[in-house]
Image (spheres, grey):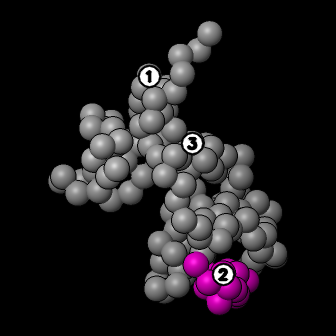
Amino acid sequence: MQAIDIMTQSVITAPPDATVEELARVMLKHRIDAVPIMDGGKLVGIVNRTDMLRALASRGAVHTTEDDRRLRDAVLAELQSHPWGGAPTVAQIMVRDGVVHLWGVFTTEEERRARIEAAEAIPGVVKVEDHMDHGTRVDPLNLPNWPKPAPP
């Protein structure tokens, strides 16, 4: 058996500029857990329910002061400037009262440690909380767009 024999052929996608609200509506309407993000016919990412929750949490309750926003932006810029930074997004870096919360996936312990140390080196950072996950193989049964059973 090959992928073509079991794959979903009518894949629901979204553009990179889709809002969180639009993505949520698509996921609910089609009962899917993730949406591939396409730009000019090229896959540029996937947004899943966990990403959505992080994005919603980061909207205001997490970085509520100007100092927290400044710290988040500084950590984001620092991590994005390094190959080991993991291409983080705003939703993967949350700051509250100077405490930086790092989310995302790392592939090596050295990469994880480098991200934490980079965040700790930003002036004004009080502490860094590590919520990152070690990269693992994707379970083929946990793919986007697999149909969900209809609610009772």
Look at the picture and state if 40 lies above or below 24.
Answer: below
Magenta-drawn segment: 107-123
Q: Nearer the viewer, residue 26 or 135?
A: 135
Residue 118 in sight here: no
Q: Secondary structure at mark 2?
A: helix
Residue type at tag 2: Arg
3D distance between C-alphas at marks 1 and 3: 14 Å
Q: Which mark is residue 49?
A: 3
Q: Is residue 35 magenta?
A: no
Q: Nearer the viewer, residue 15 or 32?
A: 32
Which callout, 2 or 3, points at the residue further toward the start of the chain?
Answer: 3
- Magenta: predominant secondary structure element? helix
Q: Nearer the viewer, residue 43 or 124?
A: 43
Residue type at tag 3: Arg
Q: In which quarter of the view is residue 25 placed?
A: top left
Look at the picture and state if 107 lies above or below 100.
Answer: below
